[in-house]
Amino acid sequence: MSVALQTRGRPEKLASMIRSLIRAAKDPSRFEILLGVDSDDSTMAGFSLPGVQYRFVTLEPGLGAARRMSRLAGESRGRYIFFLNDDVESQTFGWDTIMEEATKGVSDGIQLIHVNDGVLGEQICIYPCISKEFLEVIGDPLSTPYRRWWADDHIHNIFYLLGQLGFPRVRYLPEVLFENEVGRARRGEAVKLPQYSEAFIADTQVDKRLFIESFDLRCRDALALACHLSSNPSSATIENWEHTLSRLPCFPRQTHYSKWTQKWHRRLFWPIFRGMASSIFKWQAKP
């Protein structure tokens, strides 16, 4: 497994995160650590953690979250790539062996291993773990240039759509807890939460629009995965899958899909209101 970490300007938090990762692992030799660092990040000059093996991946300044993740995935050597942030701490001893066992549950590698963040839980996988086989089928899953959070929504939504086609490939591990600052603050830990700038908020509005606009792209990827998993499906089967996808809603976040799925009356009446709801969300997402 490759653990891919994005970081900028926070070497102390990064060091704390890596120590937490190593401390909670049963066997750190099971995974490699990749550090995605911007070429102009002077705070990382001289960064060192004695006794810890890691590799730097130099990134172009200004890349959004999605392109950074894609670059790290391209540099990874493991069969699975586990994306984490530098403010995360591992709260589960033996997380590495638990996740390794989860990878053995699907021989073809087409699955999303979803750990618990302690806040959103099963609603959305904000720390996705995906395989090289998944990338080989659909190519770059993050060609949409998200700048902030929606890269995670994008990956999870592909697997959500694949599940709607009859291939449930999300493996949720509630016992594997990786908490960020928000989760630790909710537990009562004294954590100073970041203040989001106007530029950050503006980026999230753009990302919301991109997520809605890329719905057809995610449907295409889910369809490609379904065809790969079923080995030469008939044209009638493919047409049925396409029809299923065409009847699904286009929401601005994966969390909305999770909540919608749990409400039977929404699913019952959705075909009537699909066009109206999609138009409303597209209107709200305009910059």
Image (tube, rainbow, N blue to C red):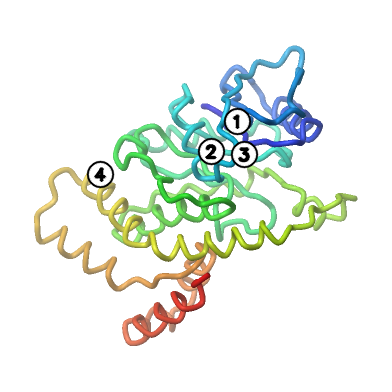
Amino acid type assigned to the residue bearing label 3 in the image: Leu
Q: Does 230 appear above or below 196?
A: above
Residues at marks 3 and 1, CA–CA distance in whole angstroms? 11 Å
Distance between mark 2 and mark 3 Cα atoms: 12 Å
Q: Is residue 268 left or right of residue 82?
A: left
The reply to whether dot 3 and dot 4 touch (C-beta < 8 Å) is no
> Label 1 vs label 2: CA separation?
7 Å
Q: Quadrant of residue 25?
A: top right
For marks 3 and 1 on the same chain, the one whose residue lies earlier in the sequence: 1
Horizontal arrangement in the rendering, residue 158 relative to residue 113 (left or right): left
Q: What is the x, y in percent for residue 268?
A: 37, 83
Q: What secondary structure is found at the residue carrying circle 1?
A: strand
Residue shown at 53%/38% (left/top)? 68
According to the image, label 3 marks what residue?
84
**Are the residues tagged 1 and 2 within 8 Å (C-beta)?**
yes
Q: Residue at the spot x=60%, y=24% of the render?
A: 33
Give the label on residue 68, or none.
2
Secondary structure at badge 3 equals: strand
Rate crowding at label 4 as few (under 14), some (14 to 19) or many (20 or more) other CA atoms within 10 Å: few
Q: Amino acid at mark 2?
A: Arg
Q: Amino acid at mark 4?
A: Leu
* Crowd tier of the residue under label 2, counting other residues whose Cα lies within 10 Å: few below 14, some 14–19, many 20 or above: many
Tell me the crowding category of disc 1: few under 14, some 14 to 19, or many 20 or more residues within 10 angstroms, Cα based: many
Label annotation for residue 229: 4
Question: Which mark identifies residue 36?
Answer: 1
Element type at marker 4? Answer: helix
